[in-house]
Image: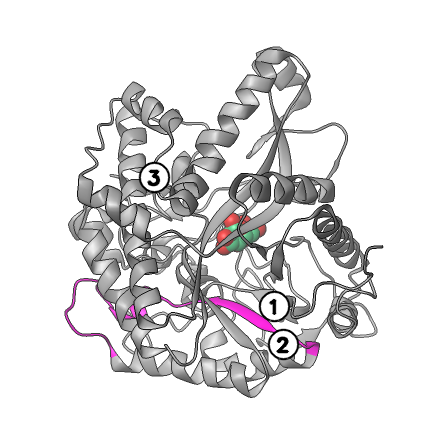
Amino acid sequence: MTEKTFPEGFLWGGATAANQCEGAYREGGKGLSVADMITSGSRTSPRQFTHEIKPELSYPSHEAIDFYHHYKEDIALFGKMGFKVFRLSIAWSRIFPNGDEKQPCREGLDFYHKVFAECHANGIEPLVTLSHYEMPYHLACAYGGWTNPAAIDFFVRYATTVLQEYKDEVRYWLTFNEINILASPFGALIAGGIIPDHDGPQMDFTQKETPEKAAKRFLALHHQFIASAKTVAIAHAINPSCMVGCMIAGMAQYPLTPNPDDMIRSQEMMKMGNWLCGDVMVRGYYPQYALNAFSKMGLNLDISEDDEEILLMGTVDFYSFSYYSSACTTCDAQAAAKAGNMIMGINNPYIKRSQWGWGIDPEGLRWYLNEAYGRYEIPMMIVENGLGAQDIIEADGHIHDPYRIDYMKNHIKAIKEAIDDGVEVLGYTSWGCIDLVSASTGEMAKRYGFIYVDRNDDGTGTFKRIPKDSFEWYSKLIKSNGAEL
Ligand code: BGP
């Protein structure tokens, strides 16, 4: 007999990232981050990276939803929903404004003390991401971002500082958000701090990347693996009861047809784009397929014995991931053109898509949980999931968002099915539990929250917070521990 409710102590909650919600980008001693140099865009016009801040352009991270000044109100609302956990990130550039200082910024450290105190006052456990697309800009400019091994030491200094500072306030940590985004070209700037030579589109999907650039990305990824593993070991030494996870952009990648060539292509995409990072961070060493792929691209990582030991000593305690959609892959160019390409792959004809073209596939989440758990056999946590949609304030002053409730219901049902399949799942934090800036488009219009924020893409709005219908629905779900789906 399977239980109707989720396992006892299941961590229900929501997730945000500093650069997408805090704003106050020059307050409290904060330095510039890479995210602060990226303009807003839309579904049809890509965000632009600029080397200098240009007053005529708009940079959404600068004000975002002003969580920096609204955190008390926001966390109280999360508490009202019954959150057990709140995933947030620390902005590295609030703690080390340039990234290479010897001493941290006290005002930055104090800000997060206040945030964590507010969480605990509301019965919420913080889950903290150390790096969520927000490397100090100075490290990107002066050192070449994560391509430089010096970034490892700067990151470890930052991580050690905050792990020590908050050891009595934070138990759950993640090192790098969606670390596998560096395995694809669009992670180079936002995750790798590899800045382009010229101002221009942040992610240009039409441009082919040179093998040299690809090799640079994987070198940057290697440095992040080392930094992450060192951080895990330090975290355990500081607080043996803390739990540190990896964080992967989880993608269900299906072959478009049962053609064996498509099967192999899809398997390869999953390996290099997805499993590689979990393989290194959970098992503590590089899989052979990755080393072979690196040598094909001319990258010699020259992994020392010390590196090998660091990777082995710093394996993670749990596997966390984001899950939004699935996509297909094929070797057949004609079939691909017919099926229609989207950013993350080829459309699956069996599933619907969101207003932003992301495939909606709850079953894919059950599939992914089973695959990942079967591979690693450590606890899983879904730390991002949700529907980015346009919300409307109706004449009655409310936001009715049955589409969001529907999306989440189906995904949470899929998690329950995976649990019934035998997967150990620690918790679920929906993405953008309060509306915030979209990472891919920089828009406010793409909303994920249970809480509406009166802030528009043209910079207007009062920052007023309004609970949507989904707020009530999620509260009930949490109170019933998943029984009232
Ligand atoms: C993930 C990121 C988040 C977040 C989310 C939704 O990739 O970790 O930062 O933004 O995707 O994506 P978007 O904001 O582009 O809709």
Q: Position of residue 10 (x, y in %)?
A: 65, 66
Reply yes or no: does residue 165 show up in magenta: no
Classify 156 as above or below 180. Answer: below
Disc 2, disc 1: CB below 8 Å?
Answer: yes
Q: Main secondary structure of the magenta part?
A: loop
Q: Amino acid at mark 2?
A: Phe
Q: Which residues are drawn in magenta?
A: 81-105
Can you tell which quarter of the image residue 132 is in? bottom left
Between disc 2 and disc 3, the foreground one is 3
Query: At x 85% / y 55%, what residue is drawn?
Result: 1
Residue carrying label 1: 434
Q: Position of residue 482 (x, y in %)?
A: 77, 64
Q: Amino acid at mark 3?
A: Tyr
Q: Name the residue tied to disc 2.
A: 78
Give the left or right position of residue 332, taking residue 116 as reference. Answer: right
Does residue 442 appear in the picture of this structure? no
Q: Which residue is mark 3?
A: 285
Are there few (<14), some (14-19), or many (20+) residues within 10 Å of tag 1? Answer: many
Q: Measure how far apart labels 2 and 3 are at the Cα level.
A: 39 Å
Quarter-of-image position of residue 203: top left
Q: Magenta includes 100?
A: yes
Q: Is mark 1 within 8 Å of ligand 1?
A: no
In the rendered image, residue 194, in percent from the top left (x then y), is placed at: 28, 43
